[in-house]
Image: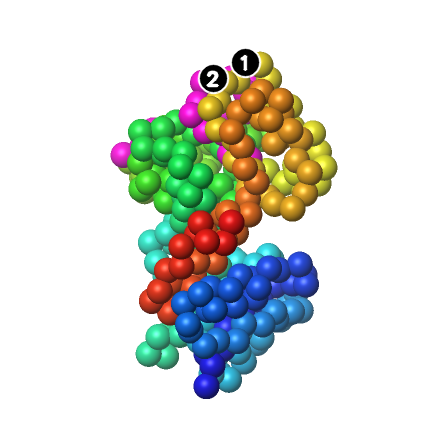
Amino acid sequence: MSKQFAVIGNPIEQSRSPELHHKFAEKTGICLEYQKRLAPLDGFMPSMQSFFAGGGVGMNVTVPFKEQAFAACEHLSERAKIAKAVNTLWMQNGVLHGDNTDGQGLVAAIQALDWDLNNSSILILGAGGATRGVIYPLVHAGVKKIVIANRTLLRAEQLVADLKDYVAEAKITAMSLKELAGDFDFIINATSASLSGDALVLPETLQFKYAYEMAYGKASSFLEQAQARGVPHSDGFGMLVGQAIESFYIWNGVRPDLKDFL
């Protein structure tokens, strides 16, 4: 009897999670079925509950339901509490557990590229949920300085205020996107600019050694600018695989090697 898993979202047809989890299962010899589950925008809770009531083992959560999943959990991991969003659900002794593996996925992807995070400085573009979800794992991987840059400076400042007590071992500050300047080891694009096609201009006053784009599968002006500078760069496919591996590990106790799937 194969274990049942699913990813829930709206829309959901674009999700590559089933493909990834079936590849992990093949590699590790675990018998599972993993399906896409489209929930109505107002129907996350009934859809999720019926999945677990029917014997489902674990569920990934994608947009727009990560905050609702967070609110539904009786037990949350530390990184989920900080992210205020959940992308991985499972039932344990009748209790709904939630975690957020996005940040660990990013860390694993960067490490798989052999880029050194230890004692590094990072500029993150954007102050939304994607940024909130990765700060804690980045600091735990050894990052010492993080600057969050956002169009609305107040939003970046609020995020810094929310997070700084959780990651006291690192220095976290805010900056406006209009004032981009400085010298960093990494620059990470967590804005939706690549998805919306908006141009994101990286001024000459900004220097960086590595560039990482959280989005994947689309042309990115951010990565084009990094390439023009001759800077090592990557899109977010590794992060996608990394977060999926972390979910797989939580559910099955086996962690596939990320490099096998890039």
Residue 59 seen anywhere in this rendered image of the structure: no
**Distance CA(mark 2)–CA(mark 1):** 6 Å
Residue wearing tag 2? 182
Query: Can you give x and y, in whole percent of width and height, for residue 61 in the image?
Result: 53, 62
Q: Residue at horizontal 44%, vertical 49%?
A: 259
SS type, badge 1: loop
Q: Is the magenta stretch mostly helix, strand or loop?
A: strand
Graded by Cα atoms within 10 Å as few (under 14), some (14 to 19) or many (20 or more), the crowding at tag 2 reads few
Residue wearing tag 1? 205
Check the image and name the residue furthest to the left: 169
Graded by Cα atoms within 10 Å as few (under 14), some (14 to 19) or many (20 or more), the crowding at tag 1 reads few
Query: Can you give x and y, in whole percent of width and height, for residue 44 in the image?
Result: 58, 69
**Label of residue 240 in the image:** none
Nearer to the camera, 43 or 218:
218
Check the image and name the residue furthest to the top: 205
Rendered position, 211 above or below 192? above
**Along the horizontal axis of the image, is 50 left or right of 91?**
right
**Who comes first in sequence, dot 2 or dot 1?**
2
Residue numbers of the magenta segment: 169-189
Amino acid type assigned to the residue bearing label 2 in the image? Gly
**Along the horizontal axis of the image, is 248 left or right of 93?**
right
Q: Residue at horizontal 46%, vertical 86%?
A: 1
Tell me whether circle 2 and circle 1 mark residues in contact (CB < 8 Å). yes
What is the tally of numbered marks visible in this picture?
2
SS type, badge 2: strand
Amino acid type assigned to the residue bearing label 1 in the image? Thr
Nearer to the camera, 240 or 94:
240
Nearer to the camera, 262 or 182:
262
Residue 62 seen anywhere in this rendered image of the structure: yes
* Residue 15 in which image quadrant: bottom right
